[in-house]
Amino acid sequence: MKGLLIKDCKLLKTQRLFLCVIFGICIMLLLWDNQRLSAVMTYASAVLSLLVINTVGYDEADNGMSFLLTFPISRSKYVLEKYVLGLLIMAAALIAGSVLVLLMGAAGSLPFGMALEIGGGVELFFTEEWLISVLSSLLTSALIISFSLPVQLKFGSEKSRVVMFGGVVLFLLGASAGKKAAEVLGIDFSAVIEWVMQADAVQVTVCLCAAMAVMLVGSYFISLAIMKRKQF
């Protein structure tokens, strides 16, 4: 797996200009409207998560997957490496976004509610907005990776774009239909919404982490089943 991670990191290194552009866009968005921290971090996580999908496309180009599997690499290790890479990218995006927020908070460019002094005159800034931003970005990344990787492995680079677009449309239509059905059936979700609003940070964090773990593990087994049946 180490060799696969090194290969993908070298592939991602070729996109460093793209990464710098995304980082610059995030800085400009925060400077333009510092109340959009959650949206900016979610946007960055979504874009960076798609890099995992791009590595699969690179592997499949020009019969590259057939060549790659001639090495002592099992299909299960290949699939697992993609999810590990996704987790590493999620962690990198989280660290980069948090460092950016801390620097801008220290410079007074972002509103923060409290500061924690760690000694030597150095202060770290934490707010509820920062926690919400972190959780929303992680959830977005987990959703994209969980949905996109199985689709990419199943349909390939060209067809997967159409399938993913159709999946998003179906999800939006399903959400709208579910909302209408709940109204017709008299189902009230206000109690759930009220619990979420009143829940403390620990409860929300645990629930979201559990949801992300379930999504990623389920997606991994689906991707593994697809990969084992696929002919190259």
Image (spheres, rainbow, N blue to C red):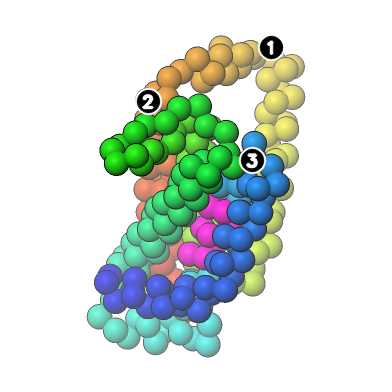
Disc 1 from disc 2: Cα separation: 31 Å
For the residue labelled by badge 2, is the local secondary structure a helix, a strand or a loop? helix
Residue occupying the point 57% across, 73% down: 17
Given residues 155 and 32, the one toward you in this image is 32
Direction from residue 58 to residue 190 in the image, left or right: right
Q: Quadrant of the C terminus?
A: bottom left
Given residues 126 and 49, the one toward you in this image is 126
Q: Amino acid at mark 3?
A: Asn
**Dot 2, crowdedness within 10 Å: few (<14), some or many (≥20)?**
few
Disc 2 from disc 3: Cα separation: 25 Å
**Dot 1, crowdedness within 10 Å: few (<14), some or many (≥20)?**
few
Residue occupying the point 44% across, 50% down: 99
**Residue tagged 1:** 186
**Region in magenta:** 44-53
Q: Position of residue 67 (x, y in %)?
A: 39, 87
**Residue tagged 2:** 202
Q: Position of residue 164 (x, y in %)?
A: 63, 57
Q: Magenta segment: does it hold 223?
A: no
